[in-house]
Amino acid sequence: MTRRGVSTALRRGALPVFAVVLAWACLVPLGVSAQEDVRCLSCHGKPGFRKTLPSGKVLELFVDPGSLRLSVHKEKHCVDCHADVSEVPHPNLPQKVNCRRCHFSGNTAGAPQIEKYLEFEQSVHGKALAAGNTKAPACQDCHGDHFILPGSDPRSQVQRTNIPQVCGTCHLKIFAEYEASVHGKALSKGVTDAPVCTSCHGEHNIRGPADMASSVNAGHVANTCARCHSKVVIMEKYGVKAEQVATYEESFHGIANEFGVLTAANCASCHTAHDILPANDPRSSVNPANIPKTCGKCHPGANANFAKGRIHINAKDKSAGIVYWVALGFKILTLSTLAGLFIHIGLDLYRKARNRKKRQDGGETERPENRP
Amino acid sequence: MSDAQEKTAWTEQDSRAVVDALYESVSTALESEAPRGVTPDQVDRLRSTLVSSLTPEVTLDVRRAARRFFEEEAKREKRAVVKQTRADKEADSVERLSLHVRVQHMILFSSCILLILTGLPIKFHEAAVSAFLIDVMGGPNVTRILHRIGAIALTFIGFYHLFYCMAFEEGRKTFGLLIPKLQDAKDALHQILYFLGVKKDRPLFGRFSYIEKFDYWAVYWGMVVMITSGYILWFKDLTINAFGKFVFDIGREAHSDEALLATLAIVVWHFYNVHFNPHKFPGSLTWLNGKITMHEFKEEHPLEYEEWKASREKEGGVP
């Protein structure tokens, strides 16, 4: 449009119309949503507001108006998420909020540009949810509903130290085992290195142990544990040997596992997955008294002799006892034998070369040398 | 030179013999062909015709006959040489290893190769080639079965060899000759001094040199260690239950370490002596046909050669 064209359009009254449209577009949604919030809270803001469904289930419908304002969604309004609510009273039961309306990569609503829901869809929880399992968790079940805070906030449900309780809401038995384990006890003592559920199982991408892509699949357990247990810096703080990872990898169990024999023992086969306890604890699966039972899972008829000798053996260390001396003996034997053989061969070749040179030079004819 | 000339030169006598033979056959032919009442004039004319036409034809035939004769002669000579060489070679080699020993050796090296191929990838599990080998052979659950098959073959041949050394005359004799003696240490020292140029001559070996004795006893030691530790590992549950886990650990360490030592000893020592030694490269066939040449016999086992020669002379054979 030319300058003349613009001015003509203005003269014809386009500007006032444009200004009104702009003001409406900017202000009305906010104003309306803000007003809607007040409308929503006229019922949902009353403590004790609840409804009994025909099935007899009681829905607690009170929402603390402050909780959303203190959360990461403080600038959002009720209908931004409860998008299917347009009438009061609601003619239909409002649907569960779908977080994916904003939480996808490329969104313009100001949500983080990440694809976590894609990981979730492939997870054991996402698949169960998609299959219609009403008990399967959706986003809200772990992250909370109105009072969602970033994972770094200690009050957040998904803050590291709170995760066991969150998972424990459904996985009660495992939560109890974990709490009693060396990892759970360390966490409750405030040890931040201690693993929580997600450290081993992942977060949005949690998969069942039978899934080959799972971090807790038999083929990956050793790598998952090794993320912490192979690090000397972490392990030395708690008096645990970081070499346990390497000694496992060198064992027949570790090698078989490496070559894909998933029936071979991994860390969890002996130490268990959740109630891991130090060997000196009588309840521990690796306490000498329990070794026959633990080994007996795969080695039928294992007796107390399975506890005679170390499990994680480093033959290069004196702690291996007699195995260290056997290894050292063979090392000396091998090196000295080979040194002798190589010297013998070298001298033989030297003499052969000398004899050939002499013959070529037409010097004295020696007895023709032969092997060796 | 003059002798040869005398023998090969065409003599007056030869000419006369040819002419006589020709005269005989021509006159016989003429007598049978000539009709009655032939005039002397006709005979004169026939004679002159025959003389002029026969000379070039006879010469040509003689040439052809000579050429054919010498060609045949050359072929015959060649065949005779080949036959003689073969006979000479046959007569010039002796059987060093009996079929009985050769078959034992074949079973031994086949099972060793199988065991090394399926075993070393476990020791060196981090190497890419190990994963490749295991994959090629059908995965770890196949290679462990192959390893056990190799183990059974090795155990069988180990015990069979003990039986051979006791039950067979040949075995008893051979085993006796393989027992290390003080002379072997002296030979080894002598050999080293020869290599260094201190001694002019190499030591004289009997049937088995110290090198061969070392090879043999290295396998003995290896068999004892590998078979014992191998069965400890194979029947792990039984051995741990009976003796404790540390026995299994010792077995595992010994099996792993001795496997490497044995493999290196074979690759370095045995392969050098029978394959890569410049005098043997790319390898002798003794393991297959059991034979060594008389030259090798004299060079490598001079004392045994002397004994062999003496015993043959005593039997009345050709020295």
Image (cartoon, rainbow, N blue to C red):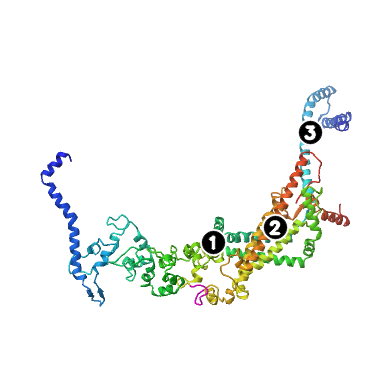
Tag shown at residue B139: 1
| Vertical placement of residue B283 versus B33, above or below | below
Determine if the magenta segment contains residue A174: no
Circles 3 and 2 in contact, beta carbons < 8 Å: no
Dominant secondary structure of the residues highlighted in magenta in the image: loop
Q: Amino acid at mark 1?
A: Gly
Q: Please give left or right for residue A129 compared with residue A219 in the image.
A: left
N-terminal of the two: label 1 or label 3? 3
In which quarter of the view is residue B165 placed?
Answer: bottom right
Is the residue marked by circle 3 packed among few (<14), some (14-19), or many (20+) residues within 10 Å?
few
Which region of the structure is painted magenta? A277-285
**How far across and how far down the image is residue B33, in percent?**
81, 31
Q: Amino acid at mark 2?
A: Thr
- For the N terminus of chain B, the quadrant is top right
**How far across and how far down the image is residue B275, in percent?**
69, 51
Q: CA distance from mark 3 to mark 2?
A: 71 Å
